[in-house]
Image (cartoon, rainbow, N blue to C red):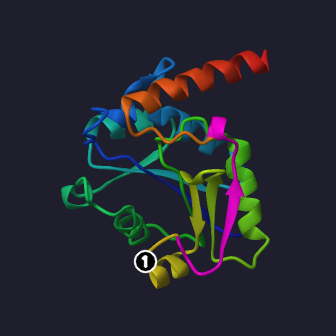
Amino acid sequence: MKNILAIIPARGGSKRVPKKNIKFFKGKPLIFYTIDEANKSPYLDRVIVSTDDEEIANISINYGAEVIKRPKRLAQDDSPIIDTIFHILDRVEADIVVCLQPTSPLRTVEDINKAIKLFLKGGYESVISFSKYGPNGAIYISTPQNLKKYKSFYASKIRGYIMPPERSIDIDTPRDFRKAQKFYNRRGRNKS
């Protein structure tokens, strides 16, 4: 069995949407939706939040994630996410790494499972989620070996996992936040 690790990078600072990762989204902190869907996946052995922020850490633990605190030097506006991934991999063993950004609250456990299954089929060095407009920031999958080789999830052999636009919103601005809430409301009505 492969040891599959989910890493949720969630730093405290955010210029355009203050405290973005724990800003309330439909009654719960934004990060809840990523932790909750990850915890539903039978493929993920561990779900770890990487953060420099005590409040994010406490909220993440309350919602069922493990937390590894990251140093401030890895939590700046210009800190590459790959350095955060390496910080976790220095402390935790894994055969496969799944990076799930908390700014994609509409990504579902089905998306996570399907992307992992694509990767497990073999033949690719990474799987990255896309919408019709390009990479959507929701799901990145690779191995520690390939991450070290390329210093990125963008390897030579990439397989795209296609997600519909209504699940592909990556929250970066207040406008994105409002748009995601509208899609979430619509999804809720469609389920009932």
Give the image location of residue 141, x and y in percent.
60, 64
Residue 162 within the segment the image draws in magenta: yes
Circle count = 1
Could you tell whether 134 is left or right of 90 in the image? right
**x then y, percent, for residue 68:** 36, 54
Q: Nearer the viewer, residue 94 or 157?
A: 157
> Which stretch is magenta?
154-167
In what element is the residue under mark 1?
A: loop
Q: Quadrant of residue 125?
A: bottom right
Q: Quadrant of residue 117?
A: bottom right
Q: Residue at x 34, y 37 (%)?
A: 56
In the rendered image, the vertical position of residue 143 relative to residue 26, given as above or below: below
Residue 106, how many percent across, how many down?
60, 35
Q: Residue furthest front?
A: 133
| Residue at x 71%, y 67% (from the top left corner) | 119
Image check: 56 left or right of 2?
left
Label 1 Cα neighbours within 10 Å, binned few <14 / some 14-19 / many ≥20: some
Q: Is 10 located above or below residue 17 in the figure?
A: below
Rendered residue at 68%/63% (across/down): 160
Task: Name, please, the residue furthest toward the left.
Answer: 73
| Quadrant, the C terminus | top right
Task: Using residue 46 as the reference point, say whether residue 42 is left or right of it.
Answer: right
Of residue 95 and residue 166, the one placed in the foreground of this image is 166
From the top left corner, tell me how far across and down residue 4 is, in percent: 62, 63
The quarter in which the N terminus is drawn is bottom right
Mark 1 = which residue? Answer: 151
Residue 119 among those drawn in magenta: no
Mark 1 residue type: Lys
